[in-house]
């Protein structure tokens, strides 16, 4: 159970209202409900009793949440002390990428260790989760310093880019979907699927690429794009999230199955990117280390 989920359980125990707790946590009620259900599956008993009168802690829930309250408080104080110590570093390098993909997250963290051990530069690493958002835009807006993500534009002279590796197309579907257990999964199997996908905002290049791939494989069913700030879940048997393969997507709920397509005719290409006019030693050292780490893993 990660610390964020512990915090959500503590907040819900204090408000005893999914509406009030979700407002405090800046989550939708349905997302909070999914997270609580996932926690209850993990511990093996109901933490909260829900009724028309409201929400109450169970006997086991009271014991669990009281201890989690101490865990959250200790985590907060430890994090404050650690951040104060890390703030003494000479620089902050902001690295963006779809960190839900374990390979991308690993390349960034191992590269940072390489630089630290070699003492090439001293910096504070700030990792920014972008999902499938278009990383080049964040770089050109100077919102981040380095990105490890998808690049779909052949002509961006403002950026320095190095190819790292490829990621297959894949799906996330409900565990009851026939696609969850199909022995061989190809583009043809998705021709009539009800596809849902991430909001359009800040993902224009990503969605344009997915549309081209779907067209090449004769997939004509429209994609339902969710509203901004909405988490994407395949909640019914016939709904499918289609796009880049994220194996760790299952952490958001026990009823989700993720699968890469066995058909590798199409891939997502992952690049390390920084601005072409970048001169800071810490940024350049980390960029080079990311490229070296990715190639050592290939």
Image: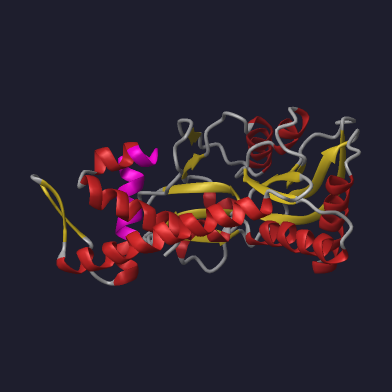
Residue 266 x %, y %: 72, 50
Q: Image check: 62 left or right of 97?
A: left
Indicate the quadrant where residue 70 lies.
bottom left
Residue 142, horizontal then vertical, whole percent: 75, 31
257 and 187: which one is in front?
257
Q: Main secondary structure of the magenta part?
A: helix
Q: Is residue 285 left or right of residue 266?
A: right
Q: Find out whether residue 29 is within the magenta segment.
A: yes
Question: From this viewpoint, which residue is outermost toward the bottom?
Answer: 44
Residue 92 sits above or below residue 261 on the image: above
Magenta highlight on residue 208: no
Q: Position of residue 144 (x, y in %)?
A: 72, 38
Image: 203 above or below 106 = above
Question: Residue 104 sits in which quadrant?
Answer: bottom right
Quadrant assignment for the C terminus? bottom right
The residue furthest left is: 53
Kindly identify the residue that appears in the image at 46 percent across and 44 percent down.
Answer: 232
Residue 2 can be seen in this image: yes
Write the residue at 20% across / 69% down: 60
The colour scheme used here is secondary structure
Location of residue 234 in the rendering, given as x and y in whole percent from the top left corner: 42, 49
What is the magenta range? 24-38
* Picture residue at 87% right of the left edge, 52% below the top: 285
Instruction: Please name the residue shown 65% across and 30% down the image.
Output: 204
């Amino acid at each position: 159970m990660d610390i964020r989920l512990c915090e959500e359980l503590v907040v819900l125990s204090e408000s005893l209202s999914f509406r009030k707790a979700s407002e405090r946590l800046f989550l939708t009620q349905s997302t909070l409900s999914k997270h609580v259900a996932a926690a209850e599956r993990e511990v093996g008993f109901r933490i909260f009793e829900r009724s028309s009168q409201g929400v109450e802690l169970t006997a086991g829930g009271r014991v669990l949440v009281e201890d989690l309250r101490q865990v959250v408080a200790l985590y907060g104080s430890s994090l404050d002390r650690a951040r104060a110590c890390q703030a003494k570093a000479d620089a902050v390098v902001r690295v963006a990428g779809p960190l839900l993909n374990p390979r991308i997250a690993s390349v960034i963290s191992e590269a940072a260790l390489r630089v630290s051990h070699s003492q090439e530069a001293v910096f504070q690493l700030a990792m920014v989760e972008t999902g499938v958002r278009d990383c080049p835009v964040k770089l050109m807006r100077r919102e981040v310093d380095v990105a490890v993500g998808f690049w779909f534009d052949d002509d961006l002279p403002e950026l320095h880019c190095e190819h790292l590796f490829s990621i297959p197309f894949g799906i996330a579907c409900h565990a009851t979907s026939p696609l969850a257990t199909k022995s061989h999964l190809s583009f043809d199997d998705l021709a009539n699927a009800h596809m849902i996908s991430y909001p359009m905002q800040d993902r224009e290049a990503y969605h344009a690429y997915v549309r081209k791939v779907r067209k090449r494989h004769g997939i004509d069913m429209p994609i339902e794009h969710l509203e901004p700030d909405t988490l994407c879940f395949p909640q019914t048997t016939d709904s499918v999230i289609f796009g880049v393969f994220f194996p760790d997507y299952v952490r958001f709920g026990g009823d989700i199955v993720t699968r890469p397509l066995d058909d590798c005719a199409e891939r997502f290409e992952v690049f390390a990117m920084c601005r072409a006019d970048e001169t800071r030693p810490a940024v350049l050292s980390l960029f080079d280390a990311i490229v070296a780490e990715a190639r050592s893993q290939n």
